[in-house]
Image: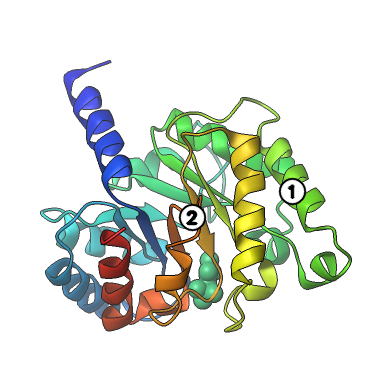
Amino acid sequence: MTKNNQKEKSQEEKSLRETSLLVGNWKMHGTRAKAMDLALAIKAGVSHPGVIVCPAFAHLEAVGRILADSVVGLGGQDCHHTTDDGPHTGDVSAAMLKDIGAEIVILGHSERRTNHGESDDLIAAKLLAARAARLRPILCVGETKDQREAGEEIAVVTAQIKAAQKFAPFGERDVIAYEPVWAIGTGLVATEEDIRAMHAHIRDLVGPAMPILYGGSVKPNNILDLRKIENVNGALVGGASLDAGAFLALALALAKV
Ligand code: PEP
């Protein structure tokens, strides 16, 4: 391991121990100018590690330049599943994300699973590609409304987590995000009891070291309750991450854990 890699690793371990992770998923929103304004506002308001934003690919470089001299990290919303360059029109590799300054990548988000038909096998391959590029993968798992109503949530999440390890077991830099699909962008949040039960179950499956984030309509008005739940090690946030005031309130709430 090079000196730089060692430094990167110990900084990550330190930030994991000292604070929760807050990851903003900006999805496919806005202009480059808006993304830059948002990045400037977040940079001005965050002084602790563990806060990361994931702009659209087209805005990554501009946002990365703004955040370069700040504690706020940069991430991608997806990556291709191969490690080599190649003829993959419209795709972005994990190595390209790393090259542009990203430190994490969101994988298996329900919008990718649903809108792009991403399979568990494909997501498992993406995990490998992300690790090979030294990106920290955030694996998203979660059940649909129908699956929850049928009492299948534990079985669904277990299967997604096991499938993600098809090619290799989880590593120490991996992160899981439990995101009930029915809670994403809907204003609905799982009950405290349901989140506690699911995060405890995931903890049993993945061991003591991996951060487990909750995602699904996380807002300033529910973060104080969420952060108290055992095995909730941070949040993956969509809608509220596009509003600097709301995102900074979340960052502050999680910094106090
Ligand atoms: C998400 O898309 O991962 C998400 C959690 O979105 P929202 O916070 O808007 O529910």
- At a point 56% along the width and 71% down the height, the residue shown is 216
- Furthest residue to the right? 150
Instruction: Give the labeled residue for mark 1.
Output: 119
Place of residue 121 in the rendered image (x, y in percent of width and height, measured from the top left): 72, 39
> At x 32% / y 80%, what residue is drawn?
246
What amino acid is at disc 1? Ser
Q: Position of residue 129 (x, y in %)?
A: 52, 34
Closer mark to the observer between disc 1 and disc 2: 2
Above or below residue 82? Residue 227 is below
Pick the front one: 83 or 216: 216
Pointer 2 residue: 232
Q: Tell whether label 2 touches label 1 (CB within 8 Å).
A: no
**Where does residue 97 sit, x and y in percent of width and height?**
37, 46
For residue 228, what is the image quadrant? bottom left
Circle 1: element type: loop
Please state the horizontal and vertical placement of residue 120, each as a whole percent of the image. 73, 44
